[in-house]
Amino acid sequence: MINYWLEHFQKASIMKTKIVITAVVLLQFFAGQLLGTTKYVSLTGSNTFPYTSLATAANTIQTAVSVCSDGDLILVDNGTYILSTLIDLGTKGITVRSINGSAVAIVDGNNATKCFEIDNVNAVIDGFTIQNGKNLGGFGGGVNIQNGGTVQNCIIKNNQARDGGGVALDYGGLVINCIVTGNTSQYGGGIRCLSPGTKVKNCLILNNTSTYLGGGVNTWDGGDIYNCTIVHNTAPDGNGAGIRTRNAGHVYNSIIVANNNTSGNLENWDVDGSGYTYNNVCTSPLPPNGSNNITSNPNFVSTTPGSEDYHLQASSPCIDAGLNFGWMSSVTDLDGNTRIVNVIVDMGPYEHFTPAPLDADGDGVPDGDDDYPLDPTRAFNNYYPASGYGTLAFEDLWPGKGDYDFNDLVCDYRFKTVTNASNKVVEIFSTFIIKAFGAGMHNGFGFQFPNDLVLQSHLTVAGYNIASGSYITLGANGLETGQVKPTVIVYDDAYRLMQNPGYGIGVNTDPNAPYVTPDTVVVHIAFTPNTYTIPQVGIDQFNPFIIVSKNRDKEVHLPNYPPTSLADQSIFGQADDTSDPGIGRYYKTSNNLPWAINIYESFDYPIERVVITSAYNHFVEWAESGGTLFPDWYQDNSGYRNASKIY
């Protein structure tokens, strides 16, 4: 039932222990004799005095303790150290620390003896699993702290004593960042604090049992409990299954819930004497003395038996609900994370925080938002049109209206602009699907950038379909030469891409002719890195055009889009065209009818030689109004189209 959080704590403990060990070694290296000596303990050491390496390590912890003086450090290798007598640090101010944490360094009392006894304010036990200690007639089954000392980063489990099954603190001492579970005693199944000056901080205390007072914790004449979660402990009726505080016992920032007495009834706390207080505590019912206590559900991540997780959900009322103390700035929570995240400390041993999102490529964009999570040079795909393909349709008999069927080229298009974490354009993939062309002429197709803000020397184009010896002249970078603005020629002749099926004019405009699978051309445009933003490129304002019958100086563009530098502007004003470059009017008849249309979704085009105004009933109103009337003229709405005239 405790496997999940136990494993989680052990991993955190290993990490914290390795950091501490590294720091200690470095300090010793630089400080020389300013620090005490370091002794080693290992089950595989040669047990050779003075035990200054793993190879010559003592085989028992007590052996190393016996040759230490104040300030010395004992580093304990992986293994299970089974005791026949307790490890007694006496009054020595030394540190006994596991090398790799509580998951792999185990001190086992073998149900024969208490495990540790310490009696110096500078003594430290750090990073062990302390288990199966037994001291039925005395204080502390796992550890007895007499007049001072610290137990930290430990798992203290399955120990027995008269007072403090897990830990007994007498007249001083600190238990911090520990999990205390499965211990049994008469007074304080998990922990017993005898007097003022004893402290317990950032601990998870659960599944402990007292046969008399305080299933999880018992404070006798004093003791301060900070930021603990005390849950699922047991004691006899009326004696504090979770915690029993007497006299100068104080509880801060703690969560005390789901503790039951031996009758099976909820009994989170019990009090006796005077001077006790509960402040910023989540428990039920409200304690009699103190302030800022709540009875809300703490909203643990999971209380499901076998997969309990006593971290706080984001919705927990215990978040940012504690009382800050100065010592919190120099310690971590039970996971080894910062103790105060959002100005005010959380209740319980685990500070809630939103983990930094994963960013595998280190570009500053979280993987969940990054379209290229493993590529630091790319981050986002930006599409135009945003929701799918648009359609271009052209009439190629400009400046005359011709048959005005708008199927001399029908091409779906979409641009994918790839930007990096700085929102600079990396590349554009321009996809064109040639669906149909009813032209008898061999037309080309291309598009021009809307402005000259993008230098042509900053672009490299690939993927176009242009024959060797073509009438199109490209530079080394794949752009058409002789242009003021960057100009991309997608293909030079539609008939090289799709062949007439042997019937009718062109391809896919006569319903009686065999259908030809559309051809797709993807043009890739690479940009000099970190140079242009999407608005500077302006691909949403691209200027598409056809080149009529391989005549490079004859272009057909969208209405009011200017020709390229290579177009013959002397054609303007001839036949049905009323273009006037002086006022920015291009490719329109006198009543605003165009020779090309751009629709931001798929377009069902007319059959060959069917005038578009016969196929679509509101095309004229739309064109003559400049797009104000019937902007949805091309959709399949009632009364909008004549289906028999549409391919």
Image: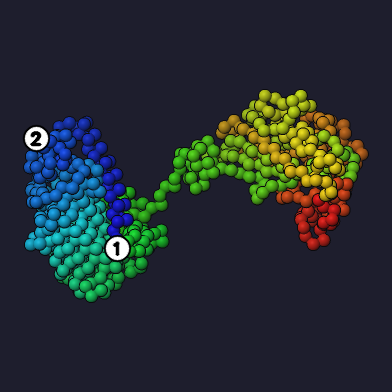
Q: Which mark is residue 255?
A: 1
Asked where in the image residue 454 lies, by quadrant, the reply is top right
Residue 181 image point, x, y percent? 23, 59
1 or 617, which is in the foreground?
1
Q: Which residue is at 72% across, 40% downward? A: 519
Element type where label 2 sits in the image = loop
- Label 2 crowd (10 A; few <14 / some 14-19 / many >=20): some
Mark whose residue sits in front, 2 or 1 = 2
Element type where label 1 sits in the image = strand
Asked where in the image residue 50 lies, by quadrant, the reply is top left
| Callout 2 amino acid | Phe
Report, in whole angstroms, how far the alpha carbon at label 2 lies from the one at label 1: 48 Å
Q: Which residue is at 59% across, 30% downward? A: 528
Residue 142 image point, x, y percent? 15, 55
Identify whether 350 is placed above or below 464: below
Residue 321 image point, x, y percent? 34, 60
Q: Residue furthest right?
A: 575
Q: Is 345 left or right of 537, judged from the image as shown?
A: left
Q: Which mark is residue 49?
A: 2
Q: Is residue 490 visible?
A: yes
Q: Is 511 left or right of 212, judged from the image as shown?
A: right
Q: Which mark is residue 132?
A: none
Q: Name the quadrant of the N terminus.
A: bottom left
Q: Which residue is at 8% across, 51% downward? A: 85
Please name the colour scheme applied to the rendered image. rainbow
Residue 49 image point, x, y percent? 9, 35
Q: Which residue is at 19% across, 41% downward? A: 77
Q: Is residue 455 visible?
A: no
Q: Earlier in the sequence, mark 2 or mark 1?
A: 2
| Callout 1 amino acid | Ile
610 or 140, which is in the foreground?
610
